[in-house]
């Protein structure tokens, strides 16, 4: 199984539907912003300015959100103050609705761009180092299930 079992269980509870794998995600450039906040000053501004290149997402993903990969499709939800999945999905789509899928690996994050048949573009990132390695597995699972990947 990709990702951590606990994440999939939390996402299943939040959505009320089966989720096989889940991981925390963030808006594109979110990791660079977090790092820049820790560095501060001129160096921090330079790092923050190096955010992900690519199309903006039509789905507004906050500082932290959750990606859930199920048997027939995927969903993205907001995160609670405690960091768990909550609320109605920001997006829910079947794999057959994905017309384009790409993954771009950076030094700190992995970015995924998805194009849906209704014209929406979804972009998000996940950390790929240390604890984030499980997130990369979930993103690869999603890419493998999209017919256009």
Image (spheres, helix red, strand yellow):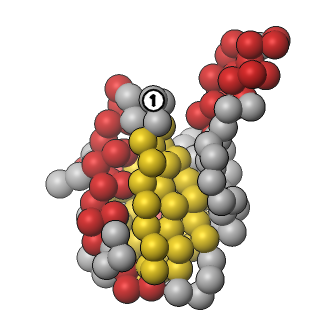
Q: Which residue is mark 1?
A: 107
The residue located at (27%, 76%) in the rendering is 71
Q: Is residue 124 above or below residue 97?
A: above
- Residue at the far left: name it: 1
Q: Position of residue 79 (x, y in %)?
A: 58, 52
Tell me the element at label 1: loop
Rendered position, 147 above or below 21 = below
Which residue occupies 30% across, 42% down?
Answer: 134
**x, y (%) of residue 59?**
66, 67
Q: Nearer the viewer, residue 25 or 50?
A: 50
Q: Is residue 119 visible?
A: yes
Q: Is residue 127 visible?
A: no
Screen quadrant of the N terminus: bottom left
Instruction: Establish if 106 lies above or below 102.
Output: above
Image coords of residue 125 (percent x, y): 52, 47
Q: Image quadrant of residue 144? A: bottom left
In the image shown, does 102 or 77 lie closer to the viewer? 102
Whether residue 68 sits left or right of residue 140 in the image: it is right
Q: Residue at x 69, y 13 (%)?
A: 39
Tell me residue 148's x, y (percent). Answer: 36, 76
């Amino acid at each position: 199984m990709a990702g951590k079992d606990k994440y999939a269980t939390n996402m299943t509870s939040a959505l009320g539907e089966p989720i096989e794998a889940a991981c925390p995600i963030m808006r594109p450039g979110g990791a660079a912003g977090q790092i820049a906040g820790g560095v501060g000053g001129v160096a921090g501004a330079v790092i923050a300015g190096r955010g992900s290149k690519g199309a903006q997402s039509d789905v507004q993903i906050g500082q932290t959100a959750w990606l859930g990969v199920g048997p027939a499709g995927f969903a993205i939800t907001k995160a609670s103050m405690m960091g768990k999945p909550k609320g109605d999905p920001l997006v829910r789509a079947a794999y057959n609705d994905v017309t384009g899928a790409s993954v771009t690996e950076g030094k700190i994050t992995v970015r995924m761009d998805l194009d849906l048949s209704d014209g929406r573009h979804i972009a998000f990132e996940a950390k790929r180092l240390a604890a984030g390695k499980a997130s990369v597995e979930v993103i690869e699972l999603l890419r493998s299930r999209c017919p256009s990947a």
